[in-house]
Image: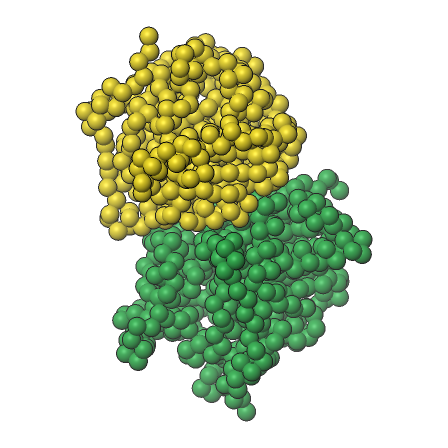
Chain colours: A green, B yellow
Amino acid sequence: MSQIPYKIYLTEEEMPKAWYNLRADMKNKPAPLLNPGTHEPMKPEELAGVFCEELVKQELDNTTPYFDIPEEILGFYKMYRPSPLVRAYCLEKKLGTPAKIYYKFEGNNTSGSHKLNSAIAQAYYAKKQGLKGVTTETGAGQWGTALSMACAYLGLDCKVYMVKVSYEQKPFRREVMRTYGASVTPSPSMETEVGKKILAEHPGTTGSLGCAISEAVEVATTTEGYRYVLGSVLSQVLLHQSIIGLETKAALDKYGIKPDMIIGCAGGGSNLGGLIAPFMGEKLRGEADYRIIAVEPASCPSLTRGKYAYDFCDTGMVCPLAKMYTLGCGFIPAPNHAGGLRYHGMSSVLSQLYDDGLMEATSVKQTDVFEAAETFARVEGILPAPESSHAIKVAIDEALKCKETGEEKTIVFGLTGTGYFDMVAYEKFHDGQMTDYIPTDEELQASFDKLPKMD
Amino acid sequence: MSQIPYKIYLTEEEMPKAWYNLRADMKNKPAPLLNPGTHEPMKPEELAGVFCEELVKQELDNTTPYFDIPEEILGFYKMYRPSPLVRAYCLEKKLGTPAKIYYKFEGNNTSGSHKLNSAIAQAYYAKKQGLKGVTTETGAGQWGTALSMACAYLGLDCKVYMVKVSYEQKPFRREVMRTYGASVTPSPSMETEVGKKILAEHPGTTGSLGCAISEAVEVATTTEGYRYVLGSVLSQVLLHQSIIGLETKAALDKYGIKPDMIIGCAGGGSNLGGLIAPFMGEKLRGEADYRIIAVEPASCPSLTRGKYAYDFCDTGMVCPLAKMYTLGCGFIPAPNHAGGLRYHGMSSVLSQLYDDGLMEATSVKQTDVFEAAETFARVEGILPAPESSHAIKVAIDEALKCKETGEEKTIVFGLTGTGYFDMVAYEKFHDGQMTDYIPTDEELQASFDKLPKMD
């Protein structure tokens, strides 16, 4: 075994060549997507109007363990992968912990996060199918940026519907998308029937993610040569994101390191599902055991306080029903600064694993998260995204527990991205203006009461 | 010779362990700094009130070829170095050129640029001298951010005087500095005598870099345990930045690649001087020949249209005189978006090399630079800083010349940083609101007329 470097990079030869489909090893498969009208499982032909054919296959395949990564995608990966697995020597020293902390850093690309991993895959299959372009929605803009980059690389048109309030208040992400040639439309817009309807009913509305999804889906399904793509929640996205975990595991194996726990932030589940994939696979096959911890914001606690039930994937209630831990598709989390973690539900795959007791979940408060973020930034040099900082907070807590007990545990966490476009949030934190919000049981119950009735 | 990977990373063993001092190989040494009062060369004891002792030595040493990099700095480097040398396969394909293009990418750290290389060195020597802290000025904030990061790592206080208009209009960089624990004061301020004086004379002024330098120097020289640090122009800064060129050369040598030309953007000269150092060294020693090209903005063309003369390093005329290609220390370049390239003069080292005909210089227009930036971003994935994009523009031009002639030249350029905090500039470009400005001969002459009279 060689000496462990500060950053472990894989060579091109050591890079994973196939994605791992966690569902293949699950005894209890994730519940199928249902048609919201008939409550019957969605058929491939129903999904094919919205998604590319190859992606429909990936979405519905619960048995094939590995999918070869196409050459063209491996080529694109070379721009920004492998991402480094970093030993957090400086953080360990700062905490005075005997724990060994590693983080997988996905932020060293222009999209600033792991979202690019699925963006390039989805754009690739759209291009391969001979499509002209794709549509999507974006809130804060991370997913839209990632998709714009992938489409620019492949020469595919990219139409992004951006929640109007973000479009106006966060012009920087918008300009990054335009730099990559995407058209960015504030939603709701007059370009779609659903947009016109919403604007007629609510003139002056600043939009919502649910509305932007509805517009993007409408344009995809009514425009020749277009399909809709989504950056999280879906099982296909977790498949693409497995590259994070596969690289992490290969890097650890290279130096004979076995982690005790793996920690990731969880919004819709794309990062966490990708990071834990090969470790959870070993756990499912009885080959190894790990603590796996999902971290979510206390303001939007789908795993820790949600119901495991069928619910709409979107606020607009036009998408299929998914069985997931959910706060109810009408739940509007209080404003917080981890935009990527504000989704009402959790990936069906992760929801099933959690329900089966195969992973833990915890929720953390926003101010504690920013305190952890600042501690991390000062010693490790990287300015973390608020989303990623949820995992930092719990990694620090676990490392401090090791300090008390003297245990030399090995902690791995996912550092999903950078916070360059989140400085308004940091400013609030510095100025003592940041607030914590935790929904009451009554608020949650009111939202649960509106869950779709299943017979 | 192994196959050339997409990105060349050095291993920890292959990393340079000493900085290279280009001055040691120069036959015509750079002219000495002069005391502005006596016009005599600055003595070490005069400089020691402003700079750390070790840095004064480095500043004045024209003969020692190598300086060992202290262990602690090598440790800090592990956070973000080696930086990758990237083969721009996608850009080559897009241009259809037979040229081979490589770029050394310095933007993958939170400061977003190469500035961190000198920040850590200067902060380290301040810490080693037992100082409490350092002061500096910053315009757009890149240097201030880099210094804040280095000081946070070493536990050193960091006082940044930020040009007031930037402080107010660019709050994001300010918040990054605050995240790293720096105090950031809008300049002019009421904290210094010079600040008070300026505010009394010009109430409501939005400040200037010259004024911020004066405030930072005043605080450093009047506060026990503080010194002043500067991010460019100085010979010590070029020494620290030689790490860029040394890594680049080691990476090229590893694969037996000999570049035909090396291209870098030039403001005060810190990036260019660092990038070209070992190549220029070979040229000076007659061991090899390279075309070396400095690229500056047409709006601030110190090498291409300036005078080679003694001038003040600062607008406030409190700093020593340096012999350099200068537009006159009172020259105010028209607003443009490459803030890091708006300095009136050029490093004395580079000025001498240029005067000796050892390197070329060219100037480019802002709109052409952003067009090149966008082309690059779309195929290479990285969103470049406006400063760096000056080098991209000329690299593309040279690659297109190769397309005409069919020559397979090898082009290396420095990609100094990312443009995440420059989206206002990209927005203007996208909206067709960006203008080009080139100073007239009359404007320049008026500025030259005010150069200090030397007898």
Q: Is residue B442 visible?
A: yes
Compared with residue A145, is residue B95 higher up or lower down, i.e. above or below?
above
Going 33% across and 65% down the picture, which residue do you hit? Answer: A186
Query: Horizontal and vertical percent for residue B128?
Result: 64, 29
Going 23% across and 30% down the picture, which residue do you hit? Answer: B439
Query: Horizontal and vertical percent for residue B86?
Result: 48, 38
Q: Is residue A22 visible?
A: no
* Nearer to me, B109 or A428: A428
Quadrant location of residue B243?
top right
* Nearer to me, A367 or A129: A367
| Identity of the residue furthest to the right in this view | A406
Compared with residue B90, is residue A169 higher up or lower down, i.e. above or below?
below
* Nearer to me, A323 or A375: A375
Compared with residue B61, is residue A393 higher up or lower down, i.e. above or below?
below
Q: Position of A23 compared to B455: left or right?
A: right
Quadrant location of residue A61?
bottom right
Q: Quadrant of the C terminus of chain A?
A: bottom right
Going 62% across and 27% down the picture, which residue do you hit? Answer: B129
Query: Horizontal and vertical percent for residue A16?
Result: 60, 52
Q: Position of B291 compared to A320: left or right?
A: left
Q: Quadrant of the N terminus of chain A?
A: top right
**How many numbered marks are there?**
0
| Identity of the residue furthest to the top in this view | B455
Quadrant location of residue B391?
top left
Going 65% across and 72% down the picture, which residue do you hit? Answer: A354
Query: Horizontal and vertical percent for residue B316?
Result: 36, 27
